[in-house]
Image (tube, rainbow, N blue to C red):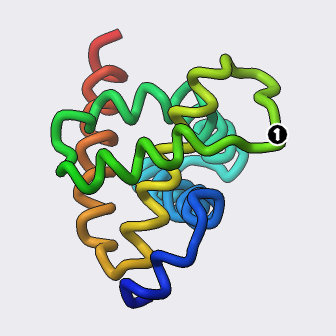
Amino acid sequence: MMNEEQLKKLSPSVFAFVGDAVYGLFVRTALADTNRSSGDLHALSVQLVNASAQSKAFHQIETYLTEEELDLFKRGRNFHTKSTPKNATVADYHTATGLECLFGYLYLSGQADRAKKLFDQIWQSFANAADHP
């Protein structure tokens, strides 16, 4: 866990870097409950950890975010990166970066429980959509 002074020194790209791993771990942990082959699990995780899926995920939790969390998301979304999306729209890519930024900040600031709660909301939406195609 980092203190506020340490957190203020980090760029949104660092938060997104960490958030990518945190979000991916949440997805993989949730998928572990499905008890499928590793190949199936990998294919499912790829479907859920990409710019398009993460953009949709953000919209599932947007109304649950605090003002501070929304500001962090916007910092990540608006951060200009050198990379360009491969299989995503620019809008989805930036939204996904914002989501990763939020998850990275929450993790690094010692708010992993909050990150998990937000992810659980996303996962529930995903599970409901899978139950009702």
Point 50% across, 55% down: residue: 101
**Is 39 situated above or below 51?**
below
The number of callouts visible is 1
Point 51% across, 64% down: residue: 22
**Is 53 situated above or below 13?**
above
Which percent across, then down, holds residue 126? 35, 31
Which percent across, then down, holds residue 99? 46, 45
Number of residues whose C-alpha sits closer than 10 Å to that of mark 1, classed few (under 14), some (14–19) or many (20 or more): few
Point 46% across, 78% down: residue: 7
Three-letter code for the amino acid on which mark 1 is drawn: Ser
Per the image, the residue denoted by label 1 is 83
Callout 1 secondary element: loop
Q: Is residue 22 left or right of residue 81?
A: left
The residue sitting at the top extreme is 133
Residue 1 in sight: no
Screen quadrant of the N terminus: bottom left
